């Protein structure tokens, strides 16, 4: 790869005490952390220009003030070379802008220049303003010194005395070091096949990652990683980021004709218009990004640590959960649930969750959504009888809800047909027989908060599984003016966040899972407010290995809900129960099987596995993940977790299909202390090595051999540091 970096790069082991430094003389900011530096400066024309993003620098004198460039031609003006940090659409700028507006008189030109800035510990705010009008933007930066992550977003203020309409509002543009040959990694998918890792070269032109469906979406997750073309799990420079937004989002990755790769992300401009009256403002979602000099593995470890320390709402370990959905679907009864609860408790389950079907006339998916009162036929004494029973067994109780939706056949819809998003005199498209409430409306928001607050206040509910089972359509808001209707895309998400924030504040013990037909709402915005997410409705264990591999690129194992379910499952595939357990034990373990059908042998294995899981849970949920062998490319999949204190490590290994009687490949462990000695405990005696204790050097250099035979064999090894 060709490089044009003009800076002296000096890698330092630790960040300076001051993470944000400003040179008034050269108008340069240097943001430095343990793992990365980021620099920008103001040029002689007042433009804020990006200067550097990569490994840590320690000397701001190394960074030259940005000098205005010259036009290359009348088609490629100097602005195309200047890497503006947050460019308005105005003047001769032909790349993706960070902000585009229209004034009431039709003038759309917006040229932003530096005004002032403020530094407060790890936070920096830079104010920009249009060259003529009082349209102001505050760029907000926060650095996280230990992980090297940066947070960026923007606040757009209309301080003119005329209304304006924002047509594109992005959170940030990230610039790669100038050059070509970069490669993009991103997560694609669809319902039941989410977070599939995809890698492709970046060329001239623009790649658009986005959701237009109202929620985060199954098709693409708002995460990216860019490397120099040849990074691996453990080597190569990787720049990565994730957008914290659970509505229509967009990330564009463009390579200009002048060898500059730019990543711009924020609110999706598709069907977007946000009017701002004089004095009003719009804040864009937070966009987090980081840098790893040591490949994709280190990148995701930084991200996971950052999420655990700064994003997730609390640090409690995830309990082992049982969810009765796949066992009973809509045939929920008090006695049936009690019977399942008895069986789940005996296995060691800690949280019992009743899924869909407990409320209104919900006997199938054609009726009842919206009517959040307990079905009196199914639960003659309300939920109290079941909850007391579950509590008596030593478990917490959880309940499924889908607050944002309504069936046409429901009392709520009959009373408030105007509450769903709709265009007058146009069809209201149903998906899974349901319509979407317009949560952008404050009356709808208050109603939903009231419903959930009442449930959480009346009953001892410790956990809501918050589902959302369809994408938006006909997103009209007839009560608003045509100009204001498109605010729906943004206000809906803000009101969703508001309900979650208020519920958590009022019920501090309540935990929440985000589900959207599987992994349709997985992003850092929702993960600030929920305790776990459901990555996919596909619980088939072999498929799940790839879904989990993709998920782990961006999100920590702690929030990755993972169930053991019955076979044959999707693809008509049957895998052994141990295989299913070990796959699920790599995240927040849950069980979704019909326990009424389990044999004594199944239950005995499950009890042993749950017991084992509880021993390794802190390592899996809060340790460092090393993806050793990938299910995309290898016959054996192997993942290793190392606890924060280095005292415990767990290796999970899965064989897809043995051929020609060949032994499984050697697995080289990582993340251990080469000088330390570890005692090995195999869950099922599949260690080919006979020595009960081995050094870190041996485990990482000579590696382990495991007797994995036939199809869908699996094993796990626990390593305990003994010296
Ligand atoms: C979709 C979810 O992903 C499932 O786990 C289950 O909760 C159903 N909805 C219930 O309708």
Image: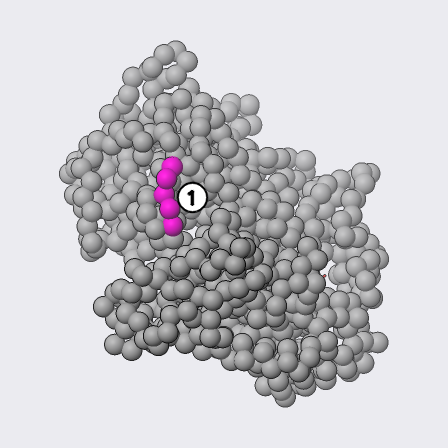
Q: Residue furthest top?
A: 74
Left or right of residue 342: residue 434 = right
Left or right of residue 424: residue 482 = left
Main SS of residues in magenta: loop
498 lies above or below 335: above
- Residue 697 in the image: x percent, y percent? 27, 64
Q: Is residue 443 among what the camera can see? A: no
Q: Residue furthest front?
A: 660
The residue lying at 29 percent from left, 29 percent from top is 2
- Element carrying mark 1: strand
Q: Nearer the viewer, residue 344 or 211?
A: 344
Q: Quadrant of ligand 1?
A: bottom right
Residue at the spot of label 1: 225
The quadrant of the picture occupied by the N terminus is: top left
The residue lying at 44 percent from left, 33 percent from top is 201
- Residue 717 in the image: x percent, y percent? 43, 71
Which image quadrant for residue 13? Answer: bottom left
Look at the image and give the residue range highlighted in magenta: 229-233
Q: Nearer the viewer, residue 411 or 374?
A: 374
Q: Is residue 293 among what the camera can see? A: yes
616 lies above or below 131: below
The residue lying at 28 percent from left, 35 percent from top is 51
- Residue 480 in the image: x percent, y percent? 68, 42
Q: Nearer the viewer, residue 562 or 370?
A: 562
- Residue 36 in the image: x percent, y percent? 28, 47
The residue lying at 64 percent from left, 57 percent from top is 538
């Amino acid at each position: 790869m060709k490089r044009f970096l003009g800076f002296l790069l000096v890698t330092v082991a630790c960040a300076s005490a001051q993470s944000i430094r400003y040179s008034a003389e050269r108008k340069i900011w240097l943001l430095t952390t343990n793992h990365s530096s980021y620099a920008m400066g103001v040029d002689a024309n007042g433009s804020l220009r990006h200067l550097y993003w990569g490994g840590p620098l320690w000397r701001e004198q190394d960074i030259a003030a940005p000098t205005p460039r010259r036009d290359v031609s009348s088609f490629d003006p100097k602005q195309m070379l200047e890497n503006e940090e947050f460019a308005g659409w105005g003047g001769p700028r032909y790349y993706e802008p960070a902000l585009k507006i229209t004034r009431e008189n039709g003038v759309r030109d917006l040229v932003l220049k530096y005004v002032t800035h403020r530094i407060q510990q790890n936070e920096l705010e830079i104010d920009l303003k249009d060259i003529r009008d009082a349209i102001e933007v505050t760029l907000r930066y926060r650095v996280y010194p230990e992980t090297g992550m940066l947070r960026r977003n923007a606040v757009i203020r209309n301080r003119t005395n005329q209304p304006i309409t924002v047509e594109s509002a992005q959170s940030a543009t990230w610039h790669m070091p100038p050059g070509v040959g970069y490669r993009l990694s991103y997560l694609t998918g669809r319902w039941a096949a989410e977070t599939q890792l995809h890698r492709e070269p970046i060329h001239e032109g623009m790649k658009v990652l986005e959701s237009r469906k109202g929620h985060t979406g199954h098709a693409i997750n708002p995460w990216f990683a860019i490397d120099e073309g040849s990074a691996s799990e453990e080597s190569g420079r990787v720049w990565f980021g994730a957008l914290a937004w659970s509505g229509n989002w967009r990330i564009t990755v463009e390579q200009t004709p002048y060898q500059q790769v730019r990543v711009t992300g924020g609110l999706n401009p598709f069907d977007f218009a946000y009017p701002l009256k004089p004095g009003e403002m719009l804040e864009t979602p937070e966009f987090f990004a980081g840098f790893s000099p040591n490949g994709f593995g280190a990148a995701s470890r930084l991200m996971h640590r950052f999420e655990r320390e700064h994003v997730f709402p609390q640090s409690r370990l995830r309990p082992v959960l049982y969810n009765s959905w796949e066992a009973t679907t809509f045939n929920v009864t008090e006695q049936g649930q009690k019977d399942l609860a008895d069986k789940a408790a005996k296995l060691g389950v800690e949280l019992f969750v009743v899924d869909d079907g407990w409320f209104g006339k919900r006997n199938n998916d054609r009726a009842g959504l919206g009517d959040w009162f307990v079905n009196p036929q199914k639960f003659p004494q309300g939920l109290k009888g079941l909850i007391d029973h579950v509590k008596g067994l030593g478990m917490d109780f959880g309940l499924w809800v889908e607050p944002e939706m309504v069936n046409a056949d429901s009392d709520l819809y009959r009373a408030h047909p105007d509450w769903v998003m709709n265009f007058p005199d146009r069809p209201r498209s149903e998906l899974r027989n349901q319509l979407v409430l317009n949560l952008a409306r404050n009356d709808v928001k208050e109603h939903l908060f009231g419903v959930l607050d009442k449930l959480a206040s009346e009953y001892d509910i410790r956990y809501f599984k918050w589902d959302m089972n369809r994408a938006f359509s006909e997103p009209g808001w007839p009560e608003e003016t045509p100009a204001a209707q498109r605010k729906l895309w943004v206000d809906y998400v803000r009101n969703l966040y508001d309900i979650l924030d208020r519920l958590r504040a009022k019920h501090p013990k309540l935990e929440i899972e985000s589900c959207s037909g599987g992994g349709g709402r997985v992003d850092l915005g929702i993960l600030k407010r929920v305790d776990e997410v459901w990555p996919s409705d596909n619980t088939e264990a072999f498929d799940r290995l790839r879904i989990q591999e993709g998920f782990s690129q961006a999100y920590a194992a702690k929030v990755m809900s993972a169930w053991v379910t019955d076979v044959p499952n999707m693809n008509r595939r049957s895998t052994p129960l141990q295989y299913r357990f070990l796959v699920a034990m790599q995240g927040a373990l849950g069980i979704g099987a019909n326990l009424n059908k389990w044999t004594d042998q199944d239950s005995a294995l499950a009890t042993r596995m749950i017991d084992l899981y509880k021993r390794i849970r802190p390592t899996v949920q809060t340790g460092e993940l090393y993806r050793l062998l990938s299910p995309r490319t290898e016959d054996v999949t192997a993942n290793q977790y190392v606890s924060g204190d280095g005292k415990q490590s767990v290796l999970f290994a899965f064989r897809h299909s043995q051929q020609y009687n060949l032994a499984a490949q050697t697995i080289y462990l990582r993340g251990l202390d080469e000088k330390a000695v570890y005692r090995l405990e195999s869950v099922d005696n599949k260690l080919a090595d006979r020595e009960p204790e081995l050094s870190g050097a041996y485990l990482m250099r000579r590696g382990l051999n495991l007797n994995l035979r036939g199809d869908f064999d699996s094993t796990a090894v626990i390593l305990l540091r003994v010296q």
